Image (cartoon, grey):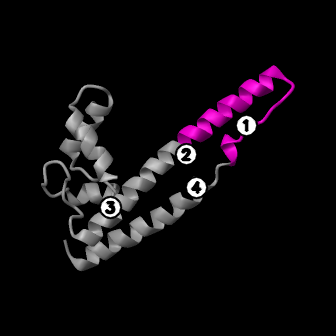
Amino acid sequence: MTKNELKKFKDILEAKQRELELLVRNRDGIAIEKSPDALDEVQHAAERELAIRNLDRESSLLRNVRGALRRIEDGSFGVCLHCEEDISPKRLAAVPWTPFCIQCQEMADRNQAGEGSENLDELLVNAA
């Protein structure tokens, strides 16, 4: 990968990191609000659950972005963390924070669904 390509990915990842850091800091949606009406309580609980899921998803994405920035710094960006093959340029263009090639990502997704091996789960944690 050329220096210009790496710089382009680094710029994209740094912009995404700034965006996600702002989103993760906003935790107003998870505040517990009390209401005298039981239906309002249910509505607040559902909104809080949605805000927590969004915060969890954004935090996970932020970890992946930071991991990709670390891989740029250490020279391993664009190489699958599992099989150590190059990640396709199309995949990197679509998901620049990905730690895996498409085949290993599919294996990780199956693992997350409960079908795969535990080793890949550990690899996912270490990638972030």
**Type of the residue with mark 4:** Leu
**Type of the residue with mark 2:** Leu
Which of the marked residues, 1 or 4, is nearer the chain's N terminus?
A: 4
Q: In which quarter of the image is residue 124?
A: top left
Q: Position of residue 114 (x, y in %)?
A: 30, 26
Frontmost of labels 1 and 4 is: 1
Please give the residue where the numbered disc 3 appears in the rendered image.
68
Which of the marked residues, 4 or 2, is nearer the chain's N terminus?
A: 4
**Type of the residue with mark 3:** Ala
Q: What element carries label 3?
A: helix
CB-based contact (under 8 Å), mark 4 and mark 2: yes
Which of the marked residues, 3 or 1, is nearer the chain's N terminus?
A: 1
Q: Position of residue 57 (x, y in %)?
A: 48, 44
- Say if the magenta span includes residue 47: yes
Please give the residue where the numbered disc 4 appears in the rendered image.
23
Which of the marked residues, 3 or 4, is nearer the chain's N terminus?
A: 4
Please give the residue where the numbered disc 1 appears in the rendered image.
32
**Type of the residue with mark 1:** Ile
Image quarter in which the N terminus is found: bottom left
Magenta-tinted stretch: 28-54
Q: Looking at the image, can residue 106 be seen?
A: no
